[in-house]
Amino acid sequence: MQVVKFGGSSLANGSQFAKVVAIMKANPARQVMVTSAPGKRHPGDVKVTDLLIQYAQAVLRQESAAEVVAKIVARYQAIADDFGLDPQIMQQISNELYQLPKMTFANHDYLMAGFKARGEKLNAFLMTAVLNHEELEATYGEPKDLGIVVTDHPNDAEVSRETYTHLEAFGRPLGVLVVPGFYGYTSHGAIATFSRGGSDITGAILANGFHADLYENFTDVDGVAAADPRVVANPQMIREMTYREMRELSYGGFGVFHDEAILPAIAGQIPINLKNTNHPDLPGTMIVPEQHFIPKHAITGIVSSQHFGAIYLHRYLLNKEVGFTLKLLQVLERHGISYEHMPSGIDDLTIILDDRQLNEAKRKAVCDEIQAAVHPDVLKWIDDYAIIMIVGEGMAQRTGLIQTILQPLASAGVHVSMINEGASQISLMLGTSRESANRAVKAIYNAFFIPINQRLEVH
């Protein structure tokens, strides 16, 4: 049995729905489908989720939302018209959308979650009708009925462990079970959504809970590329990679797959196949457990993230002071800030942070408190910071790897301010300026992604 998730671009209009129907018909093992809300039909279009956010905001401001509701209804209506569905289907969809402002929500955050979740919910309801119309037996599966229980964080929920007990006991109907992604229900019965892109999470939860043989995740790309196509022209596609390689690359900025979504699949050891709805016959990228995986190349992928900053401290005999690092972390904790890396020397220490956690006022407050807490001789905020992630299960087997990476960077004029090898030995992090990040990715890619340089050492 396979669980199949389709992204927003795969379900954006009637022609994309037709491709999805063909994909489902092509393999009877595809017995559980997870839907996203309709995405963009063309550049400049607006996703249904974003329209629902506009709807919620208008309701909260007590303004008329007639225009935006009409746009949302029109998106579903166009799909229904393409398949000639019974008008009662659209009547139900339209009624639910117009009834939203009359519903009771615990607070504004739960209202927003309830409105956003309708994109997936109504698309799953519509897809169920389309599949049955196209003579493929299908049943709509409401997350509440399946027992998908989530934590009380209305717009950033996590799945509760009891969900898997519920799914184990759930009797799946014959044919295809169509489940809306992105949301579940709290213990007190309120809708709460996962973080944005969370339909991937729903798919992995169902794959784990139903003990699927495979979790297929269909998007609008042919799989995972070894580097960002916006940085490297026509990069090689990754045919097979491990869970932890995917996690490392997702952390570094790969946006093909929701980085949290892999966790339920890891727990269930379910292989994941990332594929393209528009080219379903292509193999895509397989993401598999590390056990028995044999790397064919030294490096699997390279990615850069340019949303980092760093706090640099210098003080003589810094390494001799007990509790120095604790004082720094206490300052960060008070401000609700997590750190990414903390390379240090005998007199120097750098704290690398995700800069999106801070604004100018918080940045100044943190630096002032660190100055008062540890009295460094030098304290500097570095806002021009990027991290390059080089990832590969074969890295540990490759001798001379650092030299092969640093030589092309020197030739490209890239200054490396930090080198940090991951504890797993399958990743290497380099700190550079933001301006040189893309240049660094290109240089490393060109140095490795030719056959001779990707060879592993034979021991």
Image (cartoon, rainbow, N blue to C red):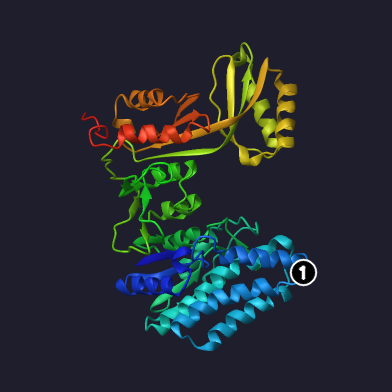
Amino acid carrying mark 1 in the image: Glu
On the image, which quarter does residue 214 sit in? bottom left
Location of the C terminus (image quadrant): top left
* Residue 31 image offset from top left, x and y in percent: 38, 71
Query: Taking 258 as reference, is 299 left or right?
Result: left
On the image, which quarter does residue 424 sit in? top left
The residue drawn where x is 46% and y is 62% is: 203
* Residue 288 image offset from top left, x and y in percent: 34, 50
* Residue 337 image offset from top left, x and y in percent: 65, 38
In the image, residue 386 sits, relative to residue 147, either above or below, namely: above
In the current view of this chain or complex, which residue is farthest to the top?
A: 316
For label 1, the crowd category at 10 Å Cα-Cα, with few meaning under 14, some 14 to 19 and many 20 or more, is few
In the image, residue 29 sits, relative to residue 226, either above or below, namely: below
The residue drawn where x is 74% and y is 68% is: 59
Location of the N terminus (image quadrant): bottom left
Would residue 187 be seen by someone viewing this image from the given angle?
no
Would residue 298 be seen by someone viewing this image from the given angle?
yes
Label 1 element class:
loop
Query: Taking 246 as reference, is 387 left or right?
Result: right
The residue drawn where x is 72% and y is 73% is: 101
On the image, which quarter does residue 400 sit in? top left
> Pointer 1: what residue?
63
